Image (spheres, rainbow, N blue to C red):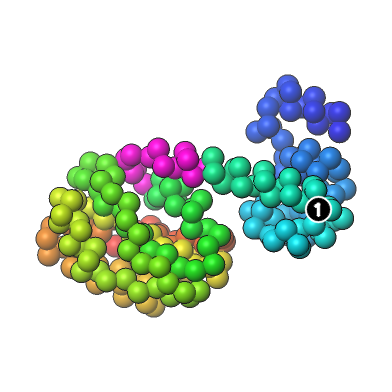
Amino acid sequence: MKNLHDKLAARGARALDDDELLALLTDDFRTAEALLAASGGSLARLAAEELSRLRMMGGLGLQRARLLLAAAEFGRRVAAAQAQETVTITGSDDVVRLFRPQLEDLAHEECWVLHLSGSNRILERQRVSQGGVDCTIVDHRLIVKRALELLATRLILVHNHPSGSAEPSPQDKVLTERLAQAAALFDIRLVDHLVIARQGHYSFCKAGLLK
């Protein structure tokens, strides 16, 4: 462990591999390796585990499980705070960074819209719907109405899939088409529709489904 502490002091935390970072948090290399193996090598999946299961993984125990979850929550809050400082959108990656911290681990679907100016400055972040495990109802007319009130010229729709898969559903595609058509009547452009999930994200724009 001394070598790890020396590496941390000399090169910083970003230089640590996943297993090294976990080893510092758990104070044990074997436990860190067992945790990564049990989570399929995914730190995100590990951080989403319930305390009752986490404490049993790799013989972690209650105290170290609590410490690990606290570290994961600290990271999420830092990411969320940094995302909230975003004022201009330059691409889909900005939107993912903005919404992943608050949407990725939800057990229900939420749909949000970004109202943007012509220069892609964020005018408002608005939650337009909150639903169940696999669906949410969105009224595209209310989205366009709010865009007109804000004098927004561009929109980005964002929602999550609690299932873990970012692949859009047929309902997602219908909503995207309806909103794009309704917004276009008022010279407002739907720039993108992003689906965020634990296994990644899906961009309608990058997929060529929006012009």
When the figure is inspected, residue 151 is found, relative to residue 53, above or below; the finding is above
Provide the residue span drawn in magenta.
79-91
Q: Is residue 63 visible?
A: yes
Quarter of the image where the N terminus is located? top right
Q: Looking at the picture, how far across and down is residue 121, in whole percent?
A: 27, 42
Q: Residue at x 50, y 74 (%)?
A: 133
Is 27 in the magenta?
no
User: What residue is at 23 percent from the left and 53 percent from the top?
Assistant: 154
Q: What crowding class fits label 1: few (fewer than 14 Cα within 10 Å), some (14-19), or many (20 or more)?
A: some
Q: Which picture quadrant has residue 34?
A: bottom right
Foreground pick, 82 / 211: 82
Write the residue at 84% across / 28% down.
Answer: 3
| SS for dot 1 | helix
208 to 170, vertically: above or below: above
Q: Amino acid at mark 1?
A: Leu
Check the picture and name the quadrant holding the C terminus. bottom left
Residue 6 spot, x, y in % from top left: 80, 24
Q: Which residue is mark 1?
A: 62
Residue 82 in the magenta stretch? The answer is: yes
